[in-house]
């Protein structure tokens, strides 16, 4: 995880704030987030070549500057309703344990920094996504961000 530590002064004590930086994106009208430490880059939609006999959520492979990367339809992986690709659709290139791959999302919203104290465990809040994909729910600017496990998305957990 990419973490920042900073000192925040309260009225009569000093505490260490631990923060996490997230890439926030939309899927099926909900906001999700991934630790920015796993994000290599964000691309507009590219040509994807289907690979036969792969799981339904596996869209295929794409050529990114000479490297062939697998691409996962994140809505299908999370069993969310399917929607058409738009001008806002993006591919987020992720890396975990020396594996790089892309995931498709409806739109990338922002990069946010959240205090770790504002993250609830996944079991405390009901989401539309299986708990195995959720590492926490972050409270940010009166919004809830469902934080996803990159290892679980790619099947390494």
Image (tube, rainbow, N blue to C red):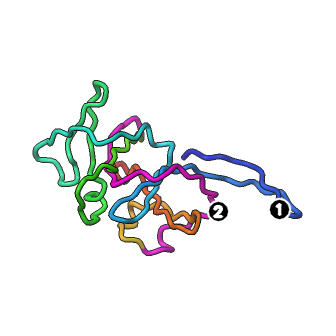
Pointer 2: residues within 10 angstroms few (<14), some, or many (20+)?
few
Q: Is residue 155 visible?
A: no
Indicate the quadrant where residue 76 lies: bottom left
Q: Is residue 75 visible?
A: yes
Q: Which labelled disc corresponds to residue 10?
A: 1
Residue situated in front as seen by the camera: 152 or 89: 89
Mostly what secondary structure, the magenta segment? strand
Q: Which residue position holds label 2?
A: 117
Residue drawn at point x = 63 percent, y = 52 percent: 19
Residue situated in front as seen by the camera: 119 or 47: 47
Taking 108 as reference, is 86 left or right? left
Q: Secondary structure at mark 2?
A: helix
Measured in 3D between alpha carbons, the distance from the residue under mark 1 to the one under mark 2, in whole angstroms, is 15 Å
Vertical placement of 28 versus 85: above or below?
below
Residue 2 colored in magenta in the image: no
Residue 138 horizontal/vertical position (percent): 54, 63
Taking 27 as reference, is 111 left or right? right
Residue 107 horizontal/vertical position (percent): 37, 53
Residue sitting farthest toward the top: 66
- Magenta range is 97-126
Q: Secondary structure at mark 1?
A: loop
Taking 149 as reference, is 55 left or right? left
Vertical placement of 121 versus 24: above or below?
below
Residue drawn at point x = 29 percent, y = 58 percent: 75
Residue drawn at point x = 30 percent, y = 30 percent: 64
Residue 100 colored in magenta in the image: yes
Pointer 1: residues within 10 angstroms few (<14), some, or many (20+)?
few
Q: Earlier in the sequence, mark 1 or mark 2?
A: 1
């Amino acid at each position: 995880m990419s973490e920042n530590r900073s000192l925040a002064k309260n009225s009569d004590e000093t505490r260490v704030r631990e923060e996490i930086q997230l890439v926030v994106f939309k899927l099926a009208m909900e906001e999700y987030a991934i630790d920015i430490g796993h994000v290599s880059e964000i691309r507009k939609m590219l040509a994807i070549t289907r690979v036969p006999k792969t799981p339904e959520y596996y869209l295929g492979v794409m050529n990114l500057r000479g490297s062939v990367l697998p691409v996962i339809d994140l809505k299908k992986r999370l069993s969310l309703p399917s929607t058409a690709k738009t001008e806002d659709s993006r591919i987020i290139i992720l890396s975990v344990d020396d594996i790089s791959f892309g995931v498709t999302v409806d739109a990338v919203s922002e990069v946010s920094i959240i205090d770790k104290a504002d993250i609830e465990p996944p079991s405390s809040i009901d989401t539309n996504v299986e708990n195995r994909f959720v590492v926490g729910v972050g409270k940010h600017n009166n919004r809830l961000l469902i934080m996803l496990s990159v290892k679980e998305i790619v099947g390494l957990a």
